Amino acid sequence: MGSEAEKVKKLLQAARIQIQQGERKKALETYREALKLDPENHQIMDRINIVEREIAAMEKFNKSRFSRAHTAGRNISSSGFVDDCIKRSDEAFKADDAVRALQELERAKRHDPDNALVKKKIAFVMCSIKVDGLADMVRSRLKADDPKLAIESIRRIFDLWQDAPVLDELLQIVEDYKGVIADVIETAAPAVKKVEKKKIVAAVPTAKTPAETPSRKKKPEKKREEKKKEKKPVAVAGGKAGGDGRKKIFAIIGVVVVLTVIVFVIMKVIGGKEPEPELIEITPALPFTETIVVQGAVDISMTLDGVLVDEGLQGVFIISDTIFTERTVMVSSPGFETLIWNTVFEEGQIRTDTLVLDSIGTSTIQVTFAYEMPEGEDDPGPEAVSFMVDGEIIEGHTDSISTGEHVFQAILTGYRTMPESVLVVNPVDLNQTLNILASEQSQITLQLASDTPGNAIFFIDGERVTTGRRMTQVLPFGRYFLQVQMEDRQDFGITINLGEDGYSRTVSLEEIVETGQLMVGPEPWSNVYVDGQHVGTTPFGGVELEPGTYTVRLSNPDFQDDTHTVEITAGETTAIQFNAVAIETPVEVVPDTAAVEEPVEDLPISSPFPIQQTAPSVPSQARARGDLHGYVTLTVLVGTDGSVQSVTIVSDPLGLGCGQAAVDAVRNWVFSPAMQGDQPVEVSTNVSVRFDIE
């Protein structure tokens, strides 16, 4: 007996190690072996149930992620991209995620605006969203004893989509509701009940007087007649019987209902089979349109409900949609405070707003601290816990801070705590809860860098933990796999060994690049043709192309045309040079009076680009802080010889000396100068310098 107990103990230890290594399926088998030896051990049973749920959740996540993932690096045709969007939309709609389905269809529409199938599916999904909203309205109104608005909502659903699947459910709910609508259906002729219930409800006036609802299962004509005979007049003011008046009203209603049903049945017979839902002609809702102009910042990003909004002109964003529930808009830029607000757009609404972003550090907010004790530990009371902001103990549990990066920490005698680095960019008062750790616990903190717009999904060992811009999790010492995911950006993943020092990191998710870049040597100048289409004149900053094989022709009147076949790969730069072979032509002397030259000042100016770069040194302050990732944006004046004339900092969200380090590095860069015709000119350009300090 003792040997079996020892074997069970070893199996449980092995299973725990397998869990820490992420091998949950092996751990599940180990737990099952242990259960065979000790069938009554409820602890092992609980562990098996937990691991089975974790495996199922991870498989579901991986399956859904695979179904919506883009295949990087392949040559995606226009039709292929649209087909992929439609497929993902259909999958989302089947999973009851109509908003996601609509977003995928909108992506397809932007790629192929004239696609009839996409337009039809958009109309269908929009109709489904409206129907779902109205169905929720029906349920809530009946719970609030408001049958008038409930029935009106059912009528609106019927007008939108006569075969909506939810109609039968809603009509049953209305039947069960104790209202006059039940009396009307009960008093209607038996033939009425055999036809479509939808038209009956659509034709019934709004109920106002509650009454008992008879069961629909017991409707013999004989009982109904007996019931009518038993009714007696009720005395009312004025000396008239109210029962007769109600009978007349219901009789009129019954006639209207019967006539409506007869017309409906005739229409059904004549019209034949109704079309499938996807073929229904639906009048689309009139979209709202809001133009937002953002001033005072560069590298601006805007999201609507976490989805990026395309930028048109510099700092100009246009939001247009047909979803009229409450929406969340966020505008951000590295080095500037983030603006977040909720709004409800109205159908057909058109308006324009202008925003000015303030630099980080402009606003002052109040931060209120709270703490959380380890599970099972007694709360010592607020007086026993102190809080530190940027290394200094504050008085009480509140402090006034500016926007920017701060370090928070709770202090409790006899317990460990972790300093938390928090980037405060939203100028709204903050509530911050800090964790008190047990002896065998530590803390994981991940947050998005300011140059990554929107919200991400955070996972630990494949299990979804939270959605947002920051995750803090207290866990026992051990090995964990951390993931951060965001649509259209590269995943972040790392395996860590969590110990007493904890783990904290700011994550910058790189945008998934679906195009490659073609660069052409600047000398001699040439007109560049890709598959016969003129794309620019060198020197220039290159051209973005979808992955695939292209024929590139370089043309200069003084040289023979030079043709190249290039393979473009997503996310990579392909460079070619002009193999200049001079054209041997007799020299023709042209009198000066015949020479006609275009004024230089009328020619376009190409952009300068760096051809020799120096990496920045790491400032001592930044090295001491560590775990720093992001960009410093600079404006550089490039001279006619390609040298740097001056450097100015545009934004420095990292601080800690990174801005000056970037300036010192860029001063040593060498550029290919801007060209106007065949003349170099002095111009300014923006560059970004990235820092990754572990």
Image: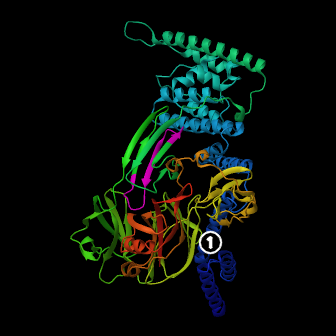
- The percent position of residue 7, horizontal first and vertical second, equals 65, 89
Asked whether residue 621 is in view, the answer is: yes
- Give the side of residue 27 with respect to residue 407, left or right: right
- Give the side of residue 463 with respect to residue 56, left or right: left
Q: Is residue 325 highlighted in magenta?
A: yes
Is disc 1 surrounded by few (<14), some (14 to 19) or many (20+) residues within 10 Å? some
Q: Which residue carries the number 1 mark? A: 51
Q: Residue at x 25, y 66 (%)?
A: 399
Q: Closest to the observer: 254 or 15?
A: 15
- The percent position of residue 333, horizontal first and vertical second, equals 43, 57
Q: Is residue 678 depicted above or below 693 in this figure? A: above
Q: Is residue 346 highlighted in magenta?
A: no
Dot 1: element: helix
Q: Residue at x 39, y 6 (%)?
A: 239
Q: Number of labelled discs?
A: 1
Q: Closest to the observer: 432 or 370?
A: 432
Which quadrant would residue 282 be assigned to in this image? top right
The part of the chain drawn in magenta is 319-339
- The percent position of residue 44, horizontal first and vertical second, equals 61, 77
Asked whether residue 479 is in view, the answer is: no
* Three-letter amino acid code at the position of disc 1: Val
Point out the image quarter for the N terminus: bottom right
- The percent position of residue 279, horizontal first and vertical second, equals 72, 32
Q: Which residue lies furthest to the left in this view?
A: 395
